Amino acid sequence: MKRHLLAVAVLATLLVSATSEFDFYKLSLMWPPSVCNTGMECIPKIPKMFTIHGLWPQYANDIPVPPYDEDPSCTNIIPTSSDEAMNDLVPIEEELTKYWPNLFIKDGKRDDQYFWRHEWEDHGMCSDYPDDPRSYFYDTFSLTTQHNPLEVMGIQPGDELNEVGTILEAVKQGLGAYPQIVCNILPRVKTLQLKEIRFCFERAKPPSVLKNCTNKLAGDCAQLTDLIRFPPPPTVAICNDEL
């Protein structure tokens, strides 16, 4: 009987999470050198700044809202199709190309729209902007220009190792809220490196108020005492493990 009641309680919790409105947004910014030095086939000249991964609606327990095609109950508005969304982005395409590039080669060439379509279908359709893709992308771009990690992390790209907890505290001191740090591993030397930094915002349209991210670490980061590298941009165009 106890096991049955426990299973019912767990199921009820999952159902509530799946059907309740989302709680906050997570702005994820990528560090291209860390993304592209692990063997991925990247564009020839990777940016020397943090670029946008996405703006994601999250439930209060930090579970991402499923894509619209998996759960259309996330909105009572029929979302703009990805084809129409791409047409709507033409006026801001120059800004998106700079700040929201697809770092990975697609079919032998650069294809930013492939990335934008993916983010729109997976996250934008279930945001507060289901029928307003231009505002969704533009507001994400605006948040990015207002929150430059290089200005608040307390470190600059280099070969030295830093405790991930020290970076978190520096951001908290500078912005008033803890971000989430995502690490990956440089295969050749098995070193942890900073791959992404994510800022959490109270739900609003547009988002503006920072809040502490529920989970401070993600990816291969496991402890606040982990030592991570913040690799400098390459001096030549490479996208493998030469860094």
Image: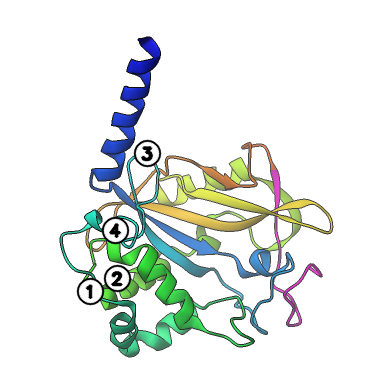
Front: mark 4 or 3: 3
Amino acid carrying label 3: it is: Asn
Label located before the other in sequence (4 or 1):
1
Quadrant the C terminus occupies: bottom right
Label located before the other in sequence (2 or 4):
2
Label located before the other in sequence (4 or 3):
3
Total numbered circles: 4
**Above or below, comparing residue 115 to residue 161 in the picture:** below
Region in magenta: 227-243
Label located before the other in sequence (3 or 2):
3
As for residue 230 lying within the magenta part, the answer is yes
Quadrant the N terminus occupies: top left
As for residue 83 lying within the magenta part, the answer is no
Q: Is 96 left, or right, of 190 in this rendering?
A: left
Q: Are the residues tagged 1 and 2 within 8 Å (C-beta)?
A: yes
Q: Which residue bears the numbered disc 1?
A: 132
Q: Are the residues tagged 3 and 2 within 8 Å (C-beta)?
A: no
Amino acid carrying label 2: it is: Tyr
At label 1, counting other C-alpha atoms closer than 10 Å, the crowd grade (few under 14, some 14-19, many 20 or more) is some
Q: Which residue bears the numbered disc 4?
A: 208
Residue drawn 32% across and 66% down?
124
**Above or below, comparing residue 11 to residue 40 in the picture:** above
Residue drawn 33% across and 89% down?
90
Q: Which residue bears the numbered disc 3?
A: 61
Secondary-structure class at tag 3:
loop
Q: Main secondary structure of the magenta part?
A: loop
Secondary-structure class at tag 1:
loop
Amino acid carrying label 1: it is: Asp
At label 3, counting other C-alpha atoms closer than 10 Å, the crowd grade (few under 14, some 14-19, many 20 or more) is few
